[in-house]
Image (cartoon, rainbow, N blue to C red):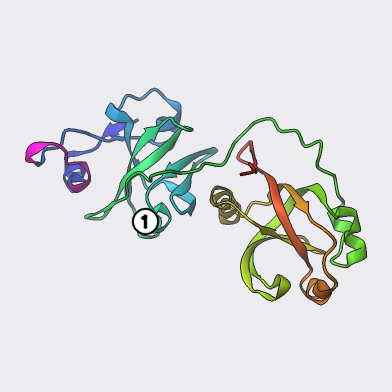
Amino acid sequence: MSKVISTVLAAVLAAGLIAGCGGKLNETYQMVTIREAGHSQIASPGFKFGFDTPDFIAANGDLALVREGNIIEFFTGIDIENKIKQVEGKKFIVGARKIYSPITHFTVDFFVVGGDTIEVGEPYAVTFPPMIKGFDEGEYEEVDISALSPETNSLKDIFNTKFKVEKAVLTYEEVNWGGTPEMAYVLNYPNIRFFIEEVSPELELVLKAFMAEDLYFDGGVSYGDRPATSTRNYRVSTKIAGPVKLEYIRYAGSVMPVVAE
């Protein structure tokens, strides 16, 4: 059952809730579960809700994902990625407002941990991953990835090809392709690996969620031209066959296509 923030907690939250003259509280945050806030008709003035230690499964910049069972919701806040780090491993309360545009999400006003209030606030602009239920995979090849190797002759069937990727283990590691070390997300199979280039912030959030929850990557990618001969030794020693670009991701029952800018 939902309940209104107690008098004691309201006093602790005063710094985040004070409005009007005289420093008096004129608003309350309704304590609810994620399911209640997102999927029920609970009335709350200003759509203001409080959540008790929600499970932030991933965060990137001003955007985060919260899971409760099979429900996943977007939360936003100024530098929410680093604000979450301040409450990791602790009991805390999140004060947030439910927003309906451009998609339904919650924008965090504050965290309360112990006797401290961490102000967050609404970011100027946030880009959400595009989410659709139906998606035409007809242009994506079904490639037998288990038959590939980093050798050039083995890769010829995927040159300039869009193909499906299923059950790939995702890691984040240093890649030295072309002589310049950089950190990259890598799709791993026992026989071959690909690193992902040009990841947008909103889709990086989803990649972080895959890793945080130990989920296999499922989606589609595109491979470019024949790799340079100079990369052969690196390919053979690391099993990294080169870069791929994300085309779409399957996550949480939806498809998230990459939208060209």
Residue at the extreme right: 153
Q: Is residue 67 above or below residue 243?
A: above
Instruction: Kindly identify the residue that appears in the image at 77 percent across and 60 percent down.
Output: 189
Is residue 123 in the magenta section? Answer: no
In the rendered image, residue 25, in percent from the top left (x then y), is placed at: 15, 37
Q: Main secondary structure of the magenta part?
A: helix
Identify which amino acid the numbered label 1 is placed on.
Lys
Q: In screen coordinates, is 107 left or right of 217?
A: left
Numbered range of the magenta stretch: 15-22
Q: Residues within 10 Å of mark 1 (few under 14, many from 20)?
A: some
Q: Is residue 226 above or below residue 251?
A: below
Q: Give the quarter of the figure containing the N terminus.
A: top left
Q: Secondary structure at mark 1?
A: helix
Q: Is residue 187 above or below residue 28?
A: below
Instruction: Kindly identify the residue that appears in the image at 38 percent across and 41 percent down.
Output: 107
**Which residue is labeled 1 in the image?**
83
